[in-house]
Image (cartoon, coloured by chain):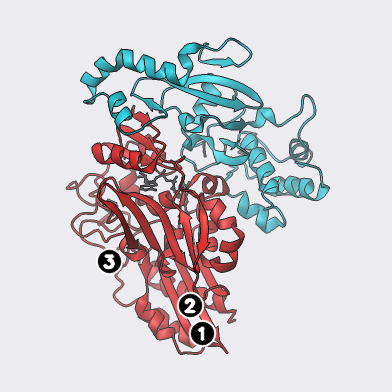
Amino acid sequence: MADSTPDSKPENPECGHNATRRQFLKQSSVLTALAFTPGPVVQAAAAEWDEKIAAPFEKVGLKLAVNGKNYKLSVEPRVTLLDLLREQLHLTGTKKGCDYGQCGACTVHVDGKRVNSCLALAVMQDGREITTIEGLAKGDDLHPMQEAFIKHDGFQCGYCTPGQIMSAVACIREGKADSEGEIREFMSGNICRCGAYPNIVAAIQEVKTGGQKV
Amino acid sequence: MNQFQYVRPSKPKAAIDARAKDQNSQFIAGGTNLLDLMKRGVMNPERLIDISRLPLDKLERENNTFRIGSMALNATVADDKQVLEKLPLLAQALNAGASAQLRNMATIGGNMLQRTRCPYFYDTALPCNKREPGSGCGALEGYNRMHAIFGFSDKCIAVHPSDMSVALVALDATVLVSGPKGDRRIPFGELHRLPGDMPQKDTTLEPGELITAVEVPEGPFTKNVHYLKVRERASYAFALVSVAAALQLENNIIKDARLAMGGVAHKPWRLTEAEKSLVGKPATEATFQAAAAIAMQGAKAFKHNAYKLKLGPNAIVQALKNATNVA
Ligand SMILES: Cc1cc2nc3c(=O)[nH]c(=O)nc-3n(C[C@H](O)[C@H](O)[C@H](O)COP(=O)(O)OP(=O)(O)OC[C@H]3O[C@@H](n4cnc5c(N)ncnc54)[C@H](O)[C@@H]3O)c2cc1C
Ligand code: SF4
Ligand code: FES
Ligand code: FES
């Protein structure tokens, strides 16, 4: 609960960066015995680690804007952006296909760039803006790419679709959708086990030539 | 994934200190290779040192040399107008690698240091000298379809999977490194090593050394270049064999030539003798065939990768033809 408080609610002071360090100090005697000497905070001061520092088992404070909403979160260092979105923020539109960067089902935009959220650590995204499939529509108005996928039957089971759509929007924005060949090449990071590729390409071409703003 | 500690130093020096002090630590840049390996238990660092926000992402051009920061993203470099114009071979090789999403995450430094895709290395239930020295090489007598035909040892027959590195070795790049003992420059061809008796060691980097940039001289290779990648599907797969070819032509006579192969050795494989054979000759298929024959001297196949003995020279000839528009 307190792990995923949108900004509108009072900030949880324990989640700030300084708080993280304070919590850390409280625990550091235990951790020192567990893992390392001298305590990493001391080392940090000596080596100018003036930013994030987190021990194993400790959660790290993290600020993210997801679909235009600001969050103050706290996560274990090993949590991926994908797991954070799905498990902590309950944004389950982003799918886990392979979890190894091979399928593209987990594609989201980070600061406007499409990435595989399964191979991104959440802590490494501190301060960034994330857009997921849930953030693409404007209220009840679907994004043109969503409309086009429906019109062209760009899916069968639908599992790869959120990733396909996020990737397709980025593909057009990057200027990599000028021909069928280029679309196929620059969409190759999104696998569709149902083989809806021809319809996906058609949807992208329509949005591209339709001239709507994506 | 195992638990680990996470630190994010703000200066390269602090990152180097942190890494040098702790053998069980690793730098993390894009994370696209390291996290993959950590999820599978192949690499288990106890501390990750996040270098992705170090101020090492600039792309500069000075005195006919490109200086590309190690944190620059693969996609950024591949799309850079000056790179496209002056180093088209590098742009082609970058775009041949991985997917658009991964190229938005992967860094230049991380790309050259990515580890082999040998399936035995990836599976902790199987023997692999690279992952666990002394456990044996599963691929030697096993499924070695993707493996080396040059420079292997009886300890390891893996290949280096990076496409970008094949172009960089051909273009005479230099790697800039900072470490606990100071700064040094490594010619690209000396960054990766052959497996010998120590397949666990991929490169000649010392513990704690951080790659800060790569320098690439502009050279005359702006027009007649081609990166050919042969793979099992049209895109988004590792190379079976790849070829980086760059020629300087004058009235169809080859003035200068660069040639390197990927997917054939533990390091990007520069073909110096074949290059020499090209210089002074007309750009014809016969010239290319002769160079390919020289390039393949000393190649040796294993049970499942004999196809590379044929695919290799064919790929060389095709890459040279594509670079010169010889039909
Ligand atoms: C599905 C898939 C397909 C792929 N296909 C291809 C392909 O076809 N061709 C290809 O070439 N690659 C391919 N890749 C690999 C991809 O290119 C690499 O994972 C990527 O380039 C690694 O860069 P990174 O910044 O993410 O490295 P990281 O994963 O962050 O780091 C890799 C290693 O390098 C070390 N490191 C990173 N930066 C530095 C530095 N500056 N100094 C010292 N050490 C450093 C890290 O400690 C780590 O050990 C593929 C990957 C996936 C997941
Ligand atoms: S080829 Fe190298 S990486 Fe593959 S199993 Fe043998 S030792 Fe391991
Ligand atoms: S779940 Fe991320 S690429 Fe498959
Ligand atoms: S629609 Fe089923 S995986 Fe693409």
Q: Earlier in the sequence, mark 1 or mark 3?
A: 3
Question: From the viewer's perspective, is residue A121 above or below residue A61?
Answer: below
Give the letter of the cyan chain. Answer: A
For residue A40, say whether it is visible: yes
For residue B146, say whether it is visible: no
Q: Residues within 10 Å of mark 1 (few under 14, many from 20)?
A: some
Residue in view at x 54 percent, y 63 percent: B92
Q: Secondary structure at mark 2?
A: helix
Of the numbered discs in the image, which one, if any, rests on residue B151? Answer: 3
Same chain, labels 1 and 3: yes
Place residue A212 in its image quadrant: top right
What's the chain of the residue with tag 2? B
Question: From the viewer's perspective, is residue B169 above or below residue A190?
Answer: below
Q: How many marks are shown on the rendered structure? A: 3
Q: Which residue position is annotated with label 1?
A: B285
Q: Amino acid at mark 1?
A: Glu
Place residue B265 in its image quadrant: bottom left
The picture places residue B115, in percent across and down from the top left corner, at 35, 50
Question: From the viewer's perspective, is residue B247 above or below residue A79?
Answer: below
Q: Amino acid at mark 3?
A: Gly
Residue in view at x 45 percent, y 79 percent: B257
Q: Split into 4 quadrants, where in the image is the C terminus of chain A?
A: top right
Q: Earlier in the sequence, mark 3 or mark 2?
A: 3
What's the chain of the residue with tag 3? B
Q: Which residue position is annotated with label 2?
A: B317
Give the letter of the red chain. Answer: B
- Depth check, front residue: A112 or B140: A112
Q: Are marks 3 and 2 in contact (CB under 8 Å)?
A: no
- Depth check, front residue: B25 or B311: B25
Q: Earlier in the sequence, mark 1 or mark 2?
A: 1
The picture places residue B267, in percent across and down from the top left corner, at 34, 61
